[in-house]
Amino acid sequence: MRVWRAELSKLVSLPSVWVAVAVGLLIPSIIAGITASAARTAIARGREAAAGIDTGYQELAFGVIGVIILGVVAISSEYFTESEDSGGGRQITTTLTAVPSRLRLLLAKASAVAAASAALSVGAAIVTMTVVQSMLGEYAPALSGQDIPRLLGVVCYWALTALLSFGITVLVRHGILPLAVLIANTSVVSVTYLLTRLTPLANYLPDMAGIRMFIRDLQDSSADIAPLVGGLVMAAWTAALLAVAAFVFCRRDA
């Protein structure tokens, strides 16, 4: 627990993490505001009957950019080379001196990332759904008890995405490549989605399976995956990647 608290404190002290928090909160809420405003106008003019069932949830899928940044910088910051005045070393050397057990250190870091990502997802969900309800007014989809599992799915999706980002960064020991690839796949061109057009098996890639936990309207999907199954598939991918990352981290030189 002491190591976990230390890693959580270290995570909070990173300036990049606060950028991640801002991104995670602002991106889904801003996109939700824009889409809800357009939907309200269309509904008022009679071009739409009601807002979609995934209103707000689709925007939260984009918000994972925030936890991608968080998961990456949590470990990549350890490999930054310090200035000459500080000795020119890397933080990972100091960290391993304080916590010699590499597996214990990695578990503490991963747990801190998961906790911070879950907390950020809760905040993002509250802000985004509030924006949707405020912008759509009487046209907003009514929130009910059925939304609780979907919102829990958002939390799981964000936390697992952060851990996937964390695991990949442990393997490559650099933040730029994971950030570029993962953010591009989330926001610009989803390679995993394009792969689903080629083979139904691509629906079982972690992000495509995990999104089933809270997105319901996937009419063009080539596979019917239940929310629980999607969550389990994403969790299995995450566990496998973290296991490989832990093995490599414990075996190689710092």
Image (spheres, rainbow, N blue to C red):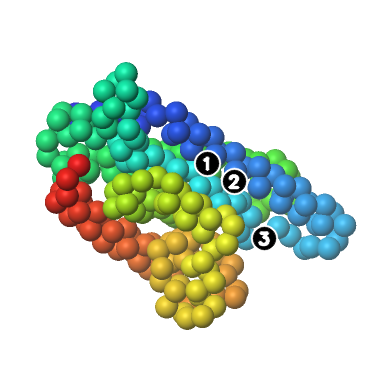
The answer to whether 74 appears left or right of 108 in the picture is right
State the image coordinates of residue 50 (x, y, percent, origin top left).
73, 60
Which image quadrant is residue 97 in?
top left
* Residue labelled with disc 3: 52
Tags 2 and 1 touching, CB below 8 Å: yes
Badge 1: few (under 14), some or many (20 or more) residues near its Cα, within 10 Å? many
Front of the two marks 1 and 3: 1
Using the rendered image of the protein, determine whether residue 89 is visible from the camera's viewpoint: yes
Badge 2: few (under 14), some or many (20 or more) residues near its Cα, within 10 Å? many
Q: Quadrant of the C terminus?
A: top left
What secondary structure is found at the residue carrying circle 2? helix
From this view, report whether residue 91 is shown above or below residue 253: above
Number of marks present in the image shown:
3
Which of the labelled discs sits on residue 24, or is there none? Answer: 1
Q: Amino acid at mark 3?
A: Gly
Between 214 and 233, the one nearer to me in the picture: 233
